[in-house]
Amino acid sequence: MTLRFAISNWAAWAPGLTDQAAWQHWLRHPSQPEAEAGQPTLSEMPAMMRRRVERLGRIALQASYWGLAEQPSCPVVFASRFGDISRSVDLLQQLAQGETLSPTAFSMSVHNAIGALFSIARADPTSYTAIAAGEETVEAAFTEAIGQLADGAEAVLVVYYDEPLPAPHQHFLPNLPDNFPRAWACRLEHAASGGISLECAPHTDATPPASRTADIEILHFLLSESTAHLHIAGKRQWRWQKHA
Amino acid sequence: MQALELEIKNLVIESLNLEDITPDDIDSNAALFVEGLGLDSIDALELGLALQKRYGVAMSADSEETRRHFASVRTLAEFVTAHRTK
């Protein structure tokens, strides 16, 4: 039997969706959020550290701080399919033009930079993981978190963040309306009873086209009354299930 | 020299993205790194790059001499005055 988890706290941030109520409403009645600009204040982080973080990183960190809230610290799994790819594209273009790269931009462009900064800013040496696993990134992150729970962690915070791909990569993803800059965080604990399970099985049929971004669909499932969610990704299907 | 010091203070603020800090907050004689403004080694590299782009000064990344030039805004202004190529 796979380990069942419960979500003891969650948080999310996107332009125009800045609190739980706004997210709950939007997940049930999805439409394009009105605001495309804006970034969180991230007042929890000292200004001398915050200055190095670009918009997507700020969004991820805001969800992380809110996801931990006042509860005791715990291991954090940061997951993003593409991470801060805008910064990497900028750096690659500068390299191609023979320009010297900004050391700050380079240090912040690596996938675990956000986790490292979260650790340094809070002087918290707990375990941090950074994951990218294509369209199964959320499942990979939850698998890692479930593994850490099974290994004895009291709780694990999963943070997911992404934004639309910048040019010239944008045609590698379908243009889904809910792929806006966003981050969400769930604090996972062992379920005393009931709980949520995640299982993986082979998939042989064709993959149906997605109408919503995978992470948004999963967040919707986790926060709704819905009892099951199936995510098909190539040769695998991931079965999310809530138990009574 | 004062005009150049102000220019360098603005370059520090701009290149290191220092929120809520104005040139008036930076003492030309105060330490830039660790103490004083509290900048770190990545800031040193970033500032070196900005100085190189703006004034065409060359410096080695990790020498005692470079450390001395980076001590304060005033020592940076003296260094730029002596070595600028643009």
Image (cartoon, coloured by chain):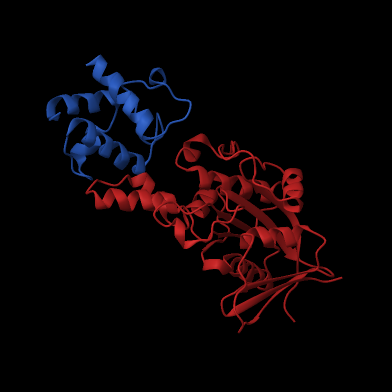
Chain colours: A red, B blue
Q: Is residue A3 visible?
A: yes
Decide: is A135 above or below B29: below
Residue B48 falls left or right of residue A186: left
Q: Is residue A133 visible?
A: no
What residue is rendered at 60% in x and 57% in y? A160
- The residue sitting at the top extreme is B2
Q: Quadrant of the C terminus of chain B?
A: top left
What residue is rendered at 74% in x and 61% in y? A222
**Residue B77 image-quadrant placement:** top left
The image position of residue A150, as x and y in percent, is 68, 73
Decide: is A145 above or below A157: below
The image position of residue A208, as x and y in percent, is 62, 72
Residue B6 falls left or right of residue A33: left
Q: Quadrant of the N terminus of chain B?
A: top left
What residue is rendered at 76% in x and 53% in y? A28
Which is more toward the observer, A21 or B19? A21
What residue is rendered at 58% in x and 56% in y? A176
Residue A92 falls left or right of residue A173: left
The image position of residue A153, as x and y in percent, is 67, 66
- The residue sitting at the right extreme is A244
Decide: is A92 above or below B38: below
Which is more toward the observer, A156 or A134? A134
Numbered-mark total: 0
Which is more toward the observer, B24 or A161? A161
Which is more toward the observer, B23 or B85? B85
The image position of residue A53, as x and y in percent, is 48, 43
**Residue B41 image-quadrant placement:** top left
